[in-house]
């Protein structure tokens, strides 16, 4: 049972979200990522507590596979990923955030390869989506400084829209 009071963090201006605004194709585990990448810069002074992540297919995959939240397997003090920056929104509905420490990309070249952490969707055949994960383990994934989470596929490229909801907390 969780004791996370998301509404309190929203009122304090510490909760944020991002989402693809157009469909994106994912990549498998690699240092070159497409889809949605949430990055916590080295030296940010915060941890990103992901309390929700989701994925919706916009195109049926061509074969068996899955879509996962993946997380970097180690922190890196290296440079911020290079890529296409996307928008971060305040969770309180006040619009685009200029206070979030996180960075979001739809395409990024990173310094480390992620590992699979949490399944979001699975495709049992090339014609049906067999599972759509309805809930994310509240606060189940914490992204340390110099690390990131992204949405990646397993086996078959997935095209769709992903989102992350997170809180920025002191380490």
Image (tube, helix red, strand yellow):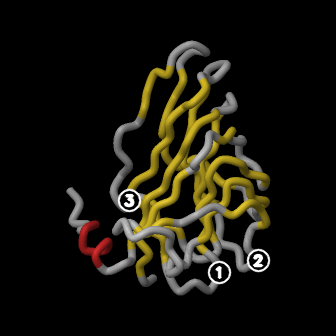
Drawn side of residue 100 relative to residue 11, left or right: right
Density class for disc 3 (Cα within 10 Å; few <14, some 14-19, many ≥20) is many
- Residue 51's tag is 3
* Along the viewing direction, whichever of 153 and 34 lies nearer the viewer: 34
Discs 1, 2 touching: Cβ within 8 Å: yes
Residue at screen point 50% across, 36% down: 56
Drawn side of residue 161 relative to residue 90, left or right: right
- Residue 42's tag is 1
Q: CA distance from mark 1 to mark 3?
A: 21 Å
Residue at screen point 78% across, 52% down: 32
Residue at screen point 75% across, 67% down: 81
Q: Position of residue 119 (x, y in %)?
A: 49, 40
Q: Position of residue 27 (x, y in %)?
A: 72, 42
Q: Secondary structure at mark 3?
A: strand
Q: Position of residue 135 (x, y in %)?
A: 35, 44
Above-or-below relation of 84 to 155: below
* Along the viewing direction, whichever of 45 and 12 lies nearer the viewer: 12
The disc, 1 or 2, on the residue closer to the chain's N-terminal end is 1
């Amino acid at each position: 049972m969780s004791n996370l009071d998301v509404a309190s963090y929203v009122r304090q201006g510490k909760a944020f979200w991002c989402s693809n605004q157009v469909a994106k194709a994912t990549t498998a585990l690699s240092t070159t990522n497409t889809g949605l990448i949430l990055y916590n810069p080295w030296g940010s002074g915060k941890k990103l507590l992901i309390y929700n992540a989701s994925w919706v297919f916009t195109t049926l995959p061509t074969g068996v596979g899955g879509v996962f939240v993946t997380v970097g397997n180690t922190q890196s003090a290296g440079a911020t990923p290079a890529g296409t920056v996307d928008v971060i929104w305040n969770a309180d509905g006040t619009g685009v955030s200029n206070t979030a420490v996180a960075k979001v990309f739809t395409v990024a070249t990173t310094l480390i390869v992620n590992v699979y952490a949490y399944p979001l969707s699975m495709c049992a055949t090339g014609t049906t989506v067999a599972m759509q994960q309805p809930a994310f383990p509240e606060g189940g994934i914490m992204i340390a400084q110099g690390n990131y989470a992204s949405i990646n596929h397993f086996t078959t490229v997935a095209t769709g829209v992903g989102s992350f909801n997170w809180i920025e907390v002191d380490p």
